Image (spheres, rainbow, N blue to C red):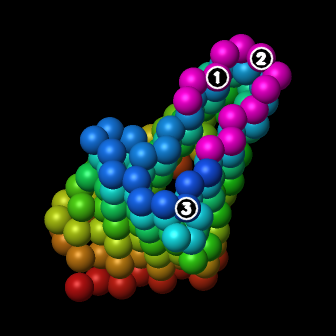
Amino acid sequence: KTGTTNNSGIYISSGAAINAGTAGISASHAGNGNILLENKAAGIITAVTGMSAINTGTATIKVANKGIINSTSAGISVASTSTQTVNVDNSSGTISAFAGTGINVLTNALLNLVGGTINVTNAANGLTFAGTNNHSLADLIINLGGTGLAFSKAANANLALSHVTLNTA
């Protein structure tokens, strides 16, 4: 879904299986309404990118994953042209990255991630931070099952970790 420059928001929710060649749930907004993407508990997304939210206006971004995401590029990808905190609630959710990264945080997005599990295999990374901002991760488990990194980040990206568990194979 692409939103035009307006005050309306974008809300996309699924609790079913999505098998997509590109993105499972995706929204890009040029306006100032909210972007809310949700994968409910029964939802299973299998896609190159599971969920993607891009703000090119002044919208706020919130992503909730309560289900399962299987990806080969990014489980969740967030980006913004203006600097903003992006809230990702992954409580009871699982992201399995077979390539790429579990969560891709692009320039100007300040990640506030809570909960869940990220499983990475092969050369996939747990989280990738392209920007040089401050990010917060809490109550997260990262299972490293390949040669990838838990965190791949730009030189000046800062991570505040609270109750983050890293497991290796």
In the image: residue 111, left or right of residue 47: right
Q: Is residue 92 highlighted in magenta?
A: no
Q: Is residue 160 in view from this perspective?
A: no
| Start-end of magenta stretch | 1-12
Q: Nearer the viewer, mark 3 or mark 2?
A: 3
Hey, what amino acid is under mark 1? Gly
Residue 27, percent from left and from top: 56, 34
Q: Nearer the viewer, residue 46 or 95?
A: 46
Residue at 40% across, 53% down? 18
In the image: residue 101, left or right of residue 99: right
Which residue matches tag 1? 3
N-terminal of the pair, mark 3 or mark 1, is 1
Q: Residue furthest right?
A: 7
Q: Nearer the viewer, residue 9 or 155?
A: 9
Residue 1, percent from left and from top: 55, 30
Which residue matches tag 3? 15
Hey, what amino acid is under mark 2? Asn
Which residue matches tag 2? 6
Q: Nearer the viewer, mark 3 or mark 1?
A: 3
Q: Is residue 7 highlighted in magenta?
A: yes
Q: Looking at the image, is 49 positioned above or below residue 90?
A: above
